[in-house]
Image (cartoon, rainbow, N blue to C red):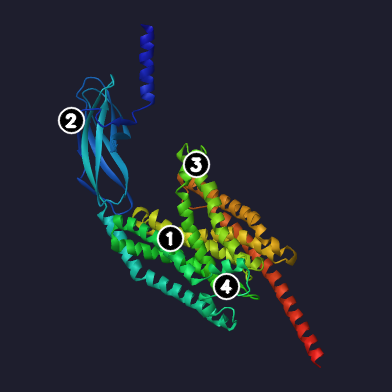
Amino acid sequence: MRGLVFIALLIALFGAAFPLSSLSEGAFVDGSLDAKITSSDTTYLESVEGVVNFSARIKNTLSAPIAIYIMEKKGGMLETIKDAGTLSGGKEMIANVGVRSKYSFESVQEKVFAVVGETQDGRFLGRYFHLRVSWEGHEKNINQSLSYASTSIVPVLGIIVALLVVALLEVAHRMQKNSEYTLRTLFFPSFRGRPVGERIADLMFDPFFWVFEAACIAILIISTYNDMAGKVGGDIGRNILLLSGLGALLLPLLYIVFARVSERYNKKPVRFFFGMFMWGGFAALLSFFVSYFQMPLFSMLGLGAGAVTFSFFATAVFAPIVEEAIKGLGVCIASWHHEFDDMLSGLLFGFAVGVGFSFVENWFYFVSKTNPFELGIVPWISLVLYRSFFNAIAHGCFTAATAAVIGYIKSHPRAFHLARHGFLPGLFVAVSLHMIFNVSALLDSFVIANYEVSVFIFNPALVAVMMVMFLAVFVSATNEEKIRSLGKRALEMMNDLQLREKSK
């Protein structure tokens, strides 16, 4: 008898220590608990998140006390949103409840709540009630903001992008005085007397290949747009597509202009920078395709047992290896060309590949993974600016590391034939930097989620360090190119003098 009493006490203690967290939908008969709700039928919210407030008046018609819970229906289960405490027999209580709600592409949401009472013998009493949440004000605000952006910001960004493209085309036109790089050779390069590797490399700088790459990227973007338009509508979807696309393109294009202008002594044709940029965008598409197979691969390796494990390995290990290998492949092919002749060329060509990759990756992310309706217009624009700036620099630095190693080896005549062997050590550096970058992003997400910090810390700090390293290597490579250029000019002058003396 004492043993049964002891067990009953344990059950009572543990029941008090662990209140009800969830309950199946059919656990009680609707209306078996005397409860009334005080609230307006519809709650109107004008931001991406809000609070639905209501009061519940509950009366215990039993003689024994019952535990009271306010629950919300999610799927086929009821989940506790408030433990209202114990209500004595024959007594009444009022429970005030505030439930946070988030927009989910429904103009009006029907929310189902329940007031549930648990008796001492484990039975459940309850009553359901329904409330509506209207997000029409929020949708109207976002639509107005996007319409304003499409008529003011988009044209300005479009003009800036057009001016940058025109500036690059003007630079390319001025370089036509070199007969090797004319409009004709752009479409139909001369292969006569050139090694096979250089002929293959020339394909990357051919407009016909650019059209193929652009068409493949367009298929990805259009399919993504169709998914988004199904949620927000065609007109709004087009505004988001244009705004996010121009936002993702502007800063990478500025970096390309900087890379082209920064060369002082051995200027490379614009077609090489554009070709590398296009390969970066195509590499992003190939990386997306490969990522579809990562879940089965991780399951085979025993790494996909949990969502956290899969997310970590996919972000910190798999993505850096795949993305840098594909980007680096284009750099390795381009290194067969004679214009890829030193560390500075590799640094700038690799950076162009990286920012091209970030352009497509960011555009896809802005359209498919986030949108202003779920984040709010200001946080969404802030995210577009943040990723366009920091991610473009980061990806540029990653691939620049691979290309710089190849270029450094190629600039030394004795090691010229070993240049492509620099791909693996360069790739190791790029993958390592990329892994650290992704881990720092995970750390930022963890800190923001758990410590209510509203800004990124680790990611921007790492990008700043990488940018300083890039600039240091850039200055060193520029000085080396200057020395080689001056030496080449001096040698040419000496040869001219010798020819003149012989002619006398």
The image quarter in which residue 407 lies: bottom right
The mark nearer the N terminus, 1 or 4, is 4
Real-space Cα separation, disc 1 to disc 3, in angstroms: 27 Å
Amino acid type of the residue that numbered disc 2 sits on in the rendered structure: Gly
Q: Residue 298 carries which label?
A: 3
Given the image, on which type of amino acid does mark 1 rest?
A: Trp
**Foreground mark, 1 or 3?**
3
Q: Which residue is drawn at 75% across and 76% down?
A: 487
Q: Which disc number belongs to residue 31?
A: 2
**Quick one: SS at disc 1?**
helix
Does label 3 or label 2 sit earlier along the sequence? 2
Q: In this view, does 373 lie to the left or right of 34?
A: right
> Alpha-carbon distance for marks 1 and 4?
24 Å
Q: Quadrant of the N terminus?
A: top left
Q: Which amino acid does label 3 sit on?
A: Phe
The label shown at residue 260 is 4
Q: Residues within 10 Å of mark 2 (few under 14, many from 20)?
A: few
Q: Which of marks 2 and 4 is in front?
A: 4
Of the residues under marks 2 and 1, which one precedes in the sequence? 2
Check the image and name the residue furthest to the front: 192
Pair 3/2: label in front:
3
From mark 4 to mark 3, how far is it between C-alphas?
41 Å
Disc 2 from disc 4: Cα separation: 74 Å
Task: Tell me, for residue 363, which label it has, or none.
Answer: 1
